[in-house]
Image: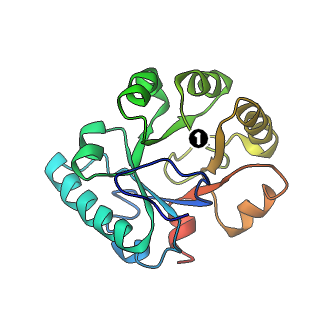
Amino acid sequence: MQPQHPARKPSLLPRQWLVTDAARLPDPLPVARRLPRGTGILFRHYEWPWHERLKLARQLAALCRARGLWLVVAGDARLALSCKADGLHLPQGLLGRAAGIARRHPRWLLLAAAHDEGAVAGAARAGVDAVLISPVFPTASHPGAAGLGVLRFAMLSQTARRRGLGVYALGGIDGKSAQRLAHIPKDGTAAIAGMAAVM
């Protein structure tokens, strides 16, 4: 589905999200130009100074509007407003702010990270639209951290869907690992290197 502007929630969530990363994908624009229409971009780049993040976010926002992509900013509502993004993504530690953000910005697509059942329940209570359950598999973003695994992801996905949340798998997702999740009901996947490598 093509995004509408000003931002308004989609009736059908994107199937894929490209997650930006300052170290592993410092310039996401070339990859973004090749994304299929309706794909989402989750803009992070947490480590960059705010004015540099704003400059890149505005470039991505213009590209997304031109190409029918969704843009969601991670963890910074001011930045999301400044670049006219389609929504906001909250790390699990910021989930307590979700209800207030949902009330103030009812047309935003609101995503949240979820690493356990408590976060899934909190996201549902707060009015979040979808959760990114992670890390499903070991990932370079968190070296040494164990992944949830297929069974645990399936359980969390089922819980989230039962509560009316959209569900995405994040963490170590590439063509091969995505096949291991193919039988699990979900709305799609999110990835950094795994998605960029095939685009």
Quarter of the figure that contains the N terminus: bottom right
Q: How many marks?
A: 1
Residue 28 appears in the picture as rendered: no
Find residue 107 and report its image quarter: top left
Residue 177: x and y in percent read: 72, 61
- Residue at x-position 59% and y-position 39%: 131
| Front residue of this view, candidates 105 and 116 | 105
Q: Residue furthest right?
A: 183
Label 1: state its secondary structure.
strand
**Compared to 198, does 146 lie above or below?**
above
Residue 7 appears in the picture as rendered: yes
**Compared to 153, does 58 lie above or below?**
below
Residue 160: x and y in percent read: 70, 33
| Front residue of this view, candidates 147 and 143 | 147
- Residue at x-position 51% and y-position 36%: 112
Residue 96: x and y in percent read: 45, 20
- Residue at x-position 36% and y-position 57%: 5
Residue 63: x and y in percent read: 33, 70
Tell me the crowding category of disc 1: few under 14, some 14 to 19, or many 20 or more residues within 10 angstroms, Cα based. Answer: many
Q: Is residue 85 left or right of residue 127?
A: left
Q: Residue furthest left?
A: 51
Render colour scheme: rainbow
| Front residue of this view, candidates 24 and 80 | 80
- Residue at x-position 79% and y-position 35%: 155
Find residue 75 and report its image quarter: top left
Q: Amino acid at mark 1?
A: Ala
| Front residue of this view, candidates 2 and 76 | 2
Residue that mark 1 sits on: 130
